[in-house]
Amino acid sequence: MKVTLRKISKIPLDFEVQSNEITFKGYLEYHAGKLILLKAKLQGSLDIECSLCAEEFKLPVDDEVEFFISDGVYENNDGIELDVVESFNSFVDLEEILDSEIELIKSDYHSCGNCKSSTI
């Protein structure tokens, strides 16, 4: 689902995107200058490998996601540190953001129930 950044206003634009068993649901809202606020929730489960035994298991996911999307290069002149994703084509691809968030979760260290109980 691609959204044109110029069309996003102060009225939140709701969205919902799915990938397998993960739902990415939230809104986009104009913030200031070239910044658009993305606030969403990731819910569902991921098939993931245990970092210890390499067995596949279902990882429950329930995460809040919040960052800004800049329509073009983001220049921080305020000294305030923000989490900003830059878009260079005036669009935001929500499916691509969902895929990136899933890969970020997968890149973390995860252990299955058996390995968690054996290390306690």
Image (cartoon, rainbow, N blue to C red):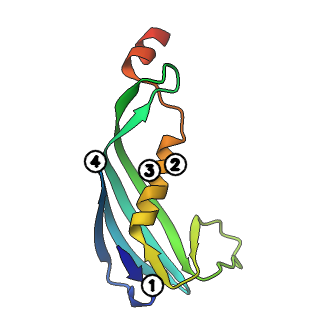
Quadrant of image for the N terminus = bottom left
Cα distance between the residues tagged 2 and 4: 16 Å
Amino acid on which the number 1 mark rests in the picture: Leu
Task: State left or right for residue 55 relative to residue 15.
Answer: right
Q: Looking at the image, can residue 108 be seen?
A: yes
Answer yes or no: do the residues labelled 3 and 2 have beta carbons within 8 Å?
Answer: yes
**Which residue is the site of mark 3?**
102
**Which residue is the site of mark 4?**
21
Cα distance between the residues tagged 4 and 1: 27 Å
Residue at image point 52% right, 21% down? 52
Q: Residues within 10 Å of mark 3 (few under 14, many from 20)?
A: some
- Sequence order check, earlier mark of 2 and 1: 1
Q: Is residue 86 above or below residue 16?
A: below
Answer yes or no: do the residues labelled 4 and 1 have beta carbons within 8 Å?
Answer: no
- Sequence order check, earlier mark of 1 and 3: 1
Residue at image point 43% right, 69% down? 38
Cα distance between the residues tagged 2 and 1: 24 Å
Cα distance between the residues tagged 3 and 4: 11 Å
Residue at image point 53% right, 32% down? 109
Residue 48, percent from left and from top: 41, 35
